[in-house]
Image (cartoon, rainbow, N blue to C red):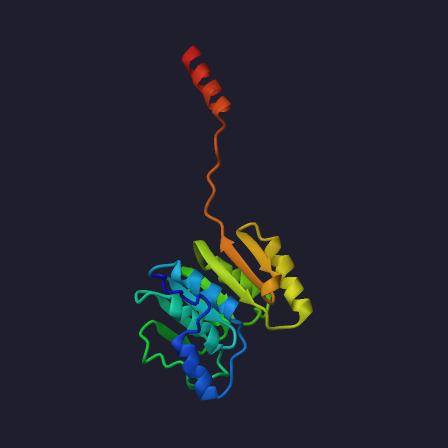
Amino acid sequence: MMAKTVDMFRSPSLLERLERDANESVGLPNDIGALVRVLAASKVGAIAMQLGIGNSEVAAWLLDGMDITSRLIMLIGPEVMPAQVGIDQNEDIRVAIHCQTAMEFMEDIKAHRFHLIVYDTLPSSNEELATAIGLLDEGGIVILLNSGPEIRWTDVLTWLSSDRRMHSANVMNMGKVIFSVRRPHQMKTIRRGARRARIKRAQQQ
């Protein structure tokens, strides 16, 4: 008996509803969405934040991977109404939608830490991105989806590559996506030879 195959790129049911409501297919490729879902699933009980324009298809992939104890904060900016997002926070207890600028919101919650941060469009400034990274827990992940001018994309990539707090990868064959992980705190290692020399000196004293 053959095992039932599972489509790893299957669309979330929420995404299918959003497509029906909009009467058109959405723009995020399924391979990118599936990877976003996998990373969301890797963080049990995660606190995730989505910044940018409130892209509901990105949120759909995130929520499809998140467990029931995880939380998704969607930051959509003061010019967008929650009803325009297409996701009802009253129907999903994991979702909270905030209408503030990114810098204002992150200042308000600067004592909190996140396990996953997703930009559905490029951050408006490197300062904003630096602030977001500062809210990441060790091992936390930042995903940047390309939606902006080429020169801005290059600037963000160059800046991230120089940030010693992060391990980053630019996935060009997936339509320009950056994945970046907050490095764990590195304790300075003591070479064995140096330790033995200190012990020998102590014994001689």
- Quadrant the N terminus occupies: bottom left
Rendered view: 178 above or below 27 = above
Q: Quadrant of residue 49?
A: bottom left
In the image as oriented, which residue stretches furthest toward the right? 151
Residue 47 image offset from top left, x and y in percent = 38, 63
Q: Residue furthest front?
A: 1
Residue 104 visible? The answer is: yes
The residue at 43%/78% (across/down) is 15
User: Considering depth in this image, is 9 or 35 the residue closer to the camera?
Assistant: 9
Q: Residue at x 65, y 68 (%)?
A: 152
Q: Position of residue 145 (x, y in %)?
A: 55, 68
- Residue 141 located left or right of residue 94: right
Q: How many marks?
A: 0
Of the 4 image quadrants, the one containing the C terminus is top left
- Residue at 46 percent across and 39 percent down: it is 187
Residue 192 spot, x, y in % from top left: 48, 25
| Residue 103 in sight here | no
- Image quadrant of residue 126? bottom right
In the image, residue 56 above or below residue 159: below
Q: Residue at x 53, y 59 (%)?
A: 179
